[in-house]
Image (cartoon, rainbow, N blue to C red):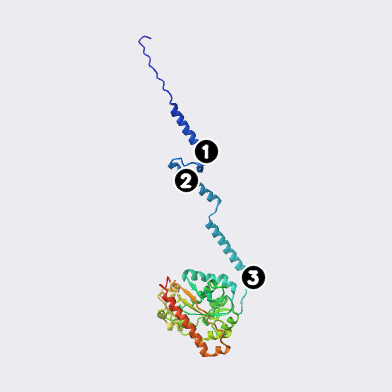
Amino acid sequence: MAGETKAKVIQLQANSERHAARARRAEARADAGRRHPSSLTNDAPAGDSADTAAVIHDLNEIRAAQGNAPVGDEESLTALAANIAAVAEFIRRRVGGDYNVDDFGFDEHLNESLLLPLLRPLFNRWFRVDVTGVENIPPTGGALVVANHAGVLPLDGLMLSVAVHDRCPGNRTLRNLAADMVFDAPFLGQLARKAGHTLACTADAHRLLSAGELTAVFPEGYKGLGKPFKDRYKLQRFGRGGFVAAAIRTGAPIIPCSIVGSEEIYPMIADLKVIARLFGLPYFPVTPLFPAAGPVGLVPLPSKWHIEFGTPIPTEGYDDAAADDPMVTFEVTDQVRETIQQTLYRLLAGRRNMFFG
């Protein structure tokens, strides 16, 4: 048509290079999705490497949760099973009468299964007892351990029993010679007998040593237990030497034993003698916490303990007549007492603090 103008259409050419690059990227993404994260190379950008490490970490956690139980849980379950089995075995033996009791009332099964385990937390964690000179305790045969006595309550005897059983050769049971008041108490007396302890008399000491038992005596008695805190670690009189006579007659060695730490568990600042006589007690202690704090005052202070067994003093060289000779018994008694006293001074000189050793 005349005068009609036609628009000129210019067709746009497709950019072949751009399409090709886009296709290559899509193919690379598809290929990466099919591959395991651990097979990716280090050519990827830093962000992709961090994502890959996170994926691998998550997969490892999932596998651990699905396949392997934590080692701590396995050990806890094993310990629980062992405790249950031990309790069941203890009940079976007690009910079935499968245990022995000696002439003194010592029940070894009850002592090892119940009494000593009850004392070990006090020994290991509360008083944190250090023990030295264990090589001086014979693994077999009779011997007489002579120790200082302090602390208002005779916890030193109990800690000494644990020390001998757990730290000394042979895991022996220590047969303590205790005061008659212990055995007059209805429940406490029976418990002491079952733990292997007996009356502090020459006859019982002779019988135990003759039978090859490891025996302990505390010659200070109540004088040591009930002395005021200002006299701490000053040994009191050792009696008439009856323990020496028993050792000489049986040929048992005498082992001096020094205990540091027991004086501080109940620092005795006064003795109410009127109340003590009223209740038939050798003393009635007043400490910083007892009786003012009531039952809380009965909790011993956590002093740091040290028990040292000294070199044995032999008695085989004496004849039977020496056991009845006061000069001989007094001489040996003084030797034992002086050895313990000097050891106490040495241990105290090396101690920085009563609660931390």
Depth check, front residue: 233 or 46: 46
Q: Which residue is drawn at 62% across and 68% down?
A: 92
Q: Residue at x 53, y 70 (%)?
A: 118
Q: Distance between the residues labelled 1 and 2?
A: 17 Å
In the rendered structure, the answer to whether residue 206 lies left or right of residue 149 reads right
Badge 3 crowding class, 10 Å Cα cut-off, few under 14, some 14 to 19, many 20 or more, is few
The type of residue carrying mark 2 is: Ala
Say which quarter of the image contains residue 353.
Answer: bottom left
Say which quarter of the image contains residue 10.
Answer: top left
Residue tagged 2:
53
Residue 220 horizontal/vertical position (percent)? 48, 83
Badge 1 crowding class, 10 Å Cα cut-off, few under 14, some 14 to 19, many 20 or more, is few
Depth check, front residue: 253 or 71: 253
Label 3 residue SS:
helix
- Looking at marks 1 and 3 on the same chain, the residue that comes earlier in the sequence is marked by 1
Residue 81 visible in the picture: yes
- In the picture, the quarter occupied by the N terminus is top left
Residue 205 horizontal/vertical position (percent)? 56, 83
- Looking at marks 3 and 2 on the same chain, the residue that comes earlier in the sequence is marked by 2
Numbered badge on residue 34? 1
Q: Distance between the residues labelled 1 and 3?
A: 69 Å
Residue 19 horizontal/vertical position (percent)? 45, 28
Q: Which residue is drawn at 48% across and 35% down?
A: 28
Q: Is residue 327 above or below residue 150?
A: below
Residue 354 horizontal/vertical position (percent)? 42, 73
Numbered badge on residue 96? 3
